[in-house]
Image (tube, grey):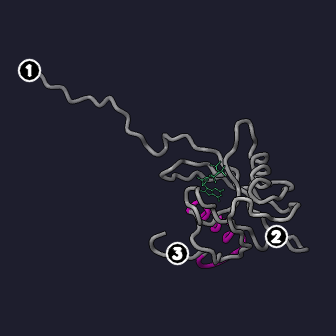
Amino acid sequence: MSTSPERKSYHVMEPTDRVPVEVAVGVLIERDAQGREGRFLLTSRPEGKVYAGHWEFPGGKLEAGETVEQALRRELIEELGITIGEAHAWQTEVMDYPHARVRLHFCKVYTWEGAFEMREGQHMAWQTLPVDVVPVLPGTIPVLQWLAAERGHPGPTHQAPVSGD
Ligand SMILES: Nc1nc2c([nH]c(=O)n2[C@H]2C[C@H](O)[C@@H](COP(=O)(O)OP(=O)(O)OP(=O)(O)O)O2)c(=O)[nH]1
């Protein structure tokens, strides 16, 4: 009697099989009169969301039919009460979290109108490198590293999370 190797008919789910959720993210940056980039804005994730309390760049998921710039403009009105000027496409990064795979579209923003209002009960902090807010969201770390490379900032970009974060 011949024995055939057991055929595997199931498919093992790999992280890369997950379709990424598209996310628009704004890196709001102050510039001086010479156009040099200075402080940038971080906001904390509100209660009730995954990674609540972690610091990130403001933004959110694209809705059906939206471009990155449209989504970013809508999200920043909804979350911060400001209307942004031009969004300059900068970097894209895919992150795999237990809760989702996301494709982050980071845009630099230099102009906005309106007074900041934390409409989701979050907090905001204008930062330079190294940032002094803790903990930062994992997806924020590459952005800090890109900023450090652009600015020639040596050394750490952020503080390690306190254990338990
Ligand atoms: N806003 C933002 N999200 C980020 C960053 N880095 C990063 O990994 N993410 C992830 C966290 C979330 O999984 C996803 C954004 O989703 P979200 O829950 O904040 O989006 P949203 O405001 O549209 O929320 P909702 O409709 O689900 O309430 O992207 C970042 O710098 N900013």
Judged by depth in the image, the label closer to the viewer, 3 or 1, is: 3
Which of the two labelled residues, at mark 1 and mark 2, occupies the earlier sequence position?
1
Furthest residue toward right = 33
Q: Quadrant of residue 85?
A: bottom right
Judged by depth in the image, the label closer to the viewer, 1 or 2, is: 2
Crowding at dot 3, Cα within 10 Å, few <14 / some 14-19 / many 20+, comes out as few
Q: Is residue 144 magenta-colored?
A: yes
Circle 2 sits on which residue?
Answer: 30
Inter-mark Cα distance, 3 to 2 = 26 Å
Crowding at dot 1, Cα within 10 Å, few <14 / some 14-19 / many 20+, comes out as few
- In the image, what residue occupies the spot 55% across and 62% down? 138
**Stretch of the chain drawn in magenta:** 138-156
Q: Amino acid at mark 2?
A: Glu
The foreground one among 145 and 101 is 101
Q: Amino acid at mark 3?
A: Ala
Direction from residue 49 to residue 89 in the image, left or right: right
